[in-house]
Amino acid sequence: MDLTPRNGLGGQMGFSYATMARRYDVTAERVDSSDVTPKFALIGLGNAWPAAEGLGAGTPASQWVARVAFGASHDQQERKALEDLDRILASGTGRYENFALLGRLKVGERDSVELAVNRRAESATDLINIGAENNQLSSSRSVSASRADVAAGWRHRWPGLEAAAAFRWAKPAGYNSAAGSFQKASGSLYGADAEVRWRCAGWTLSLHGEGMWGNLDVHRESAPDFVDRDRTLPASFEAVRLGVGYSWPRTELFLTSTYDRQHLPFVSIAILGTEAVAFDRGYDADSLNDQFYFDLAFRYAISPAIRLRIGVVMGWGEETVTLRDSASALPDLALDVHRRGVFGGGLSSSLGAPETALFIGADFAIGSPSP
């Protein structure tokens, strides 16, 4: 779901700022908010050989790409005090280590086989203050989350049209270790995806869908006795994307809208103070997140060898976190978590700053640029 890559050998570089935000309206006057803000440096290298003239919708017949994105991140969480609830503050630092590999090989005039590998990982250490004065330390925690994806598929081309289908494997993992609780989960999800891409004159339209389902092995412990709680629980990733783009002689625009649904039996990024207290009391989390993303990419060729690129991604969503007492003595708790920031919209659940990623970078030819 991207702009057509450069033909021939080329490199890519860029910088990005992003935020992931979660908020829970504790009362009409109090919000429990948490966010993670990574800042990335991105580099890539690749080579592409175009399909035959008139065939397909811009995807190369053969291609290889390697990309890495490293970045530092900052965690911030706050729940202000109420009469019967302690104030909870958390702050920490972490890092992201992201890798992506793509291989595409021409098979005949109209077909290509494809293999893609993508791994995204974040880890952080947070300092937590519950109820005490400013700058006091109640405890610390280590958190991490990762997702590895592999896709192997086939692409066929017609004049101005192409379609692809692939087998998908994904391995999500989450980890949360604090003084009063310990949780980790990982496992394999299996599924497939399909894509259709059409190009006519300067227009490009694309439609992509994917789904992966399976079970994760989940291990949990909590105070006071830290007895092992091991379960195998369902998880899933599902998404539908629609993209439209237009190209001028030197300028390209591409807009993608995505509906994404994730079901995971854990929470391990941007943890709310309400969730942290519940985990220490023996509650187990189940998260169902529905989110919409809008991704706008702009590229301008300042010369045959160099093209500048600017990108903006914005996301809004609603997440339901169900907390179940591991001892089955207390009723379930359901948190309606908004996937948006606390700033920009006051306390209204229908407003608020979106989750955002901003990118600026360039791609450049290595050697003589291909036409």
Image (cartoon, rainbow, N blue to C red):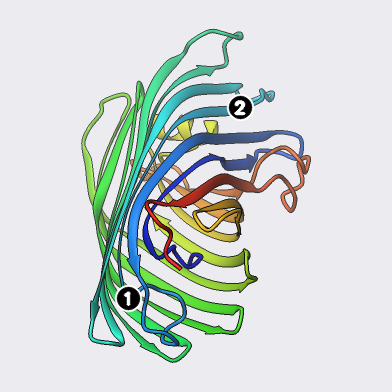
Mark 2 or mark 1: whose residue is earlier in sequence: 1
Q: Which mark is residue 78?
A: 2
Task: Say which of 309 and 258 sits in front.
Answer: 309
Task: Say which of 17 and 335 sits in front.
Answer: 17
> Is mark 2 in CB contact (under 8 Å) with mark 1?
no
Vertical placement of 204 versus 236: above or below? Answer: below
Task: Say which of 268 and 197 sits in front.
Answer: 197
Q: For label 2, count other residues whose C-alpha is less than 10 Å away and answer few (under 14), some (14-19) or many (20+).
A: many
In the image, is 349 to the left or to the right of 255? right
Vertical placement of 316 versus 175: above or below? Answer: below
Indicate which label's residue lies in the foreground, 2 or 1. 1
- Residue 183: quarter of image: top left
Q: x and y percent of residue 145 in the render? A: 36, 41
In the image, is 39 to the left or to the right of 318? left
Does residue 281 show up?
Answer: no
Q: Secondary structure at mark 2?
A: strand
- Residue 249: quarter of image: bottom right
Q: x and y percent of residue 131 in the render? A: 57, 16
- Residue at the spot x=57%, y=55% of the render? 303
Q: Amino acid at mark 2?
A: Glu
- Residue at the spot x=43%, y=41% of the render? 42
Task: Say which of 338 and 49 sits in front.
Answer: 49
Q: Which residue is mark 1?
A: 61
Does residue 20 show up?
Answer: yes
Query: How far is the residue under mark 2 from the one under mark 1?
Result: 50 Å
Q: Amino acid at mark 1?
A: Ala
Q: Secondary structure at mark 1?
A: loop
